[in-house]
Image: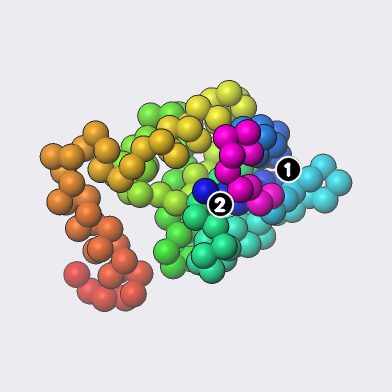
Amino acid sequence: MRIVVAADPWGLALKEAVKEHLTGLGHEVTDLGCTEDAPESYYNVAAVAAKKLQAGEAERAVLCCGTGMGMAIVANKFKGVYASVVESPQAARLCSAINKANVLTLGGLLMTPFSAIESVNAWLDTKHTQGLEEHSEFLCQALKDIAAIEEGVAL
């Protein structure tokens, strides 16, 4: 899978740990920054990552900042980008199963590299509606309704 990773200085350690893990799993990982020598703002790297998803240059993204919240706010401004802030593997599982999130945002001030990697694994390993099959019809319709909202179509 093609995955982009990005961070601001507060998420750099998580990004590096996640990047190494994803590469080790055989994913094609593109690092959009930052580095210790070239710090970036969360809003710049989140926007670049979201544009890569929109352009089809990646299927997913992992974005790391202090809380994950700033990255999610920016990424979610882009049509077709669904970013979820997670602080546990369970939340990561649910953002895949319920929301089919294509972006995971993590907080370097809130998570250890181990918990970030566990969350990334849960997110990648969970399919939409997995474990929630009795709600499958609703969850699939929700994705269509959200896409309509993005298009400015009233429900």
Q: Which mark is residue 2?
A: 2
Q: Residue 9 carries which label?
A: 1
Amino acid under label 1?
Pro
The structure residue drawn at horizontal position 45% and vertical position 29%, both measured from the top left corner, is 88
Q: Is residue 61 visible?
A: no
The structure residue drawn at horizontal position 42% and vertical position 55%, both measured from the top left corner, is 82
Q: Earlier in the sequence, mark 1 or mark 2?
A: 2
The alpha-carbon separation of the residues under discs 1 and 2 comes to: 23 Å
Disc 1: CA contacts within 10 A as few (<14), some (14-19) or many (>=20)? many
Quarter occupied by residue 152:
bottom left
Amino acid under label 2?
Arg
The structure residue drawn at horizontal position 50% and vertical position 35%, both measured from the top left corner, is 120
Which element carries disc 1, helix, strand or loop? helix
Which element carries disc 2, helix, strand or loop? strand
Disc 2: CA contacts within 10 A as few (<14), some (14-19) or many (>=20)? some
Q: Where is residue 46 in the image (x, y as percent from the top left)?
A: 60, 56
For the record, the magenta segment spans 23-31
